[in-house]
Amino acid sequence: MATKKFMYVNRKAPYGTVYALEALEVVLIAAAFEQDISLAFIDDGVYQITKEQSTDGIGMKNFSATYKALGDYDINKIYVEKESLDDRGLTADDLMPLVWEDEDDDWAEKPSIKIVSREEMAAVLAAQDVHYSF
Amino acid sequence: MKFTVMINEGPYQHQSSDSALQFCRAVLAEGHDIFRVFFYNDGVNNGTRLSVPPKDDRQLQKEWSQLAKDHSLDMVICIAAAQRRGLMDASEAERQGLDANNIIDGFHISGLGQLIEGSIQSDRTVIFGD
Amino acid sequence: MAMLHIVNKSPFERVAFKSCLDHALAGDSILMIEDAAVGATDGTIFSEELKAAMADKSVYVLGGDLAARGVSEDRMIDGIKVVDYAGFVNLTVENDTTQSWV
């Protein structure tokens, strides 16, 4: 099968609606199809990957750890928009450290998250073949 | 051109099912092909045959079902989303030990891989959601 | 690669439309459907921003959605094109990709 560039655009906070979780479920299935996968976190989507999420008080399963597993599926192009962080009083330090291991570099652990400007994000979005948004 | 269309919202609650239905009809009227229609999130509720809207309202599930029949469309309900929301076909209901099933003709239940494959095989993927 | 951006949220209620404008590139097309159709109205707190985007992007509205919300075409921003569902399909064909700003 041909390889296409798939972009998962995440713009919604987790838990309030099911979109973040069900987007993540698609990403995990997609990993088996050997396509070129990227994730974008824009607007409230940045809250999906904040660290120290606790769902003890809401009776829902905390699925944030699943993002940390993405590197094991060779999903390592995770773009986070700087303006979206800034607008919400967040910085890169508020995000989970998402990493992958580079087999061509003696399995060195490398960051998956790229903080990009809005302009860079627009260019990344424009370079994709398929845009999934949930 | 080949299209895959994804619907992420339930009928009546949100316009996305209406919009997607009209879009699919137009795709076919313009001479294009629909490779697959994939129903995800609350969109799976478009596939129940137990919906009884008022007589003077549109009959969304039946209209989708009819469209599938008229054009031999491949309309897939995501199994994970369907299980959460109580959408079952006969074999899945039996597998789960349930006493009923509720899928309308023209839809079938399958996995998320069908969405990915649809987008790989199609020239365009168009998403209708909230 | 030109992209069709599909927006379905009113610009007066959610940031999706603004976010779309912030990420659309010159040569792209923007189609307003469902609640986003109200964004086609001139003389609103949003109209100047949309007009600015129209300098290098094409903007369309689904006629049925506009009419359903009681916005007559003579109240629209000049230069917005009204399309039907066939026009919607053609826009998806003419552009290389589509993105829905849901």
Image (cartoon, coloured by chain):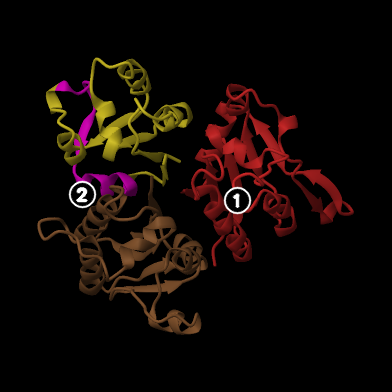
Q: Which residues are magenta?
A: C75-93
Residue A79 appears in which quarter of the rendering? top right
Residue wearing tag 2: C86
Q: Amino acid at mark 2?
A: Ala
Image colour assigned to chain C: yellow
Residue C83: say if magenta.
yes
Q: Residue drawn 40% across and 56% down?
A: B42
* Numbered disc 1: secondary structure: loop
Q: Nearer the viewer, residue B112 or A96?
A: A96
Write down the chain letter for disc 2.
Answer: C
Q: Nearer the viewer, residue A120 or A111?
A: A111
Residue wearing tag 1: A59
Chain letter, red:
A
Q: Amino acid at mark 1?
A: Gly
How far from the left and from the top, in percent, is residue C41? 23, 23
Q: Is residue C31 above or below residue B106?
A: above
Residue A57 appears in which quarter of the rendering? top right
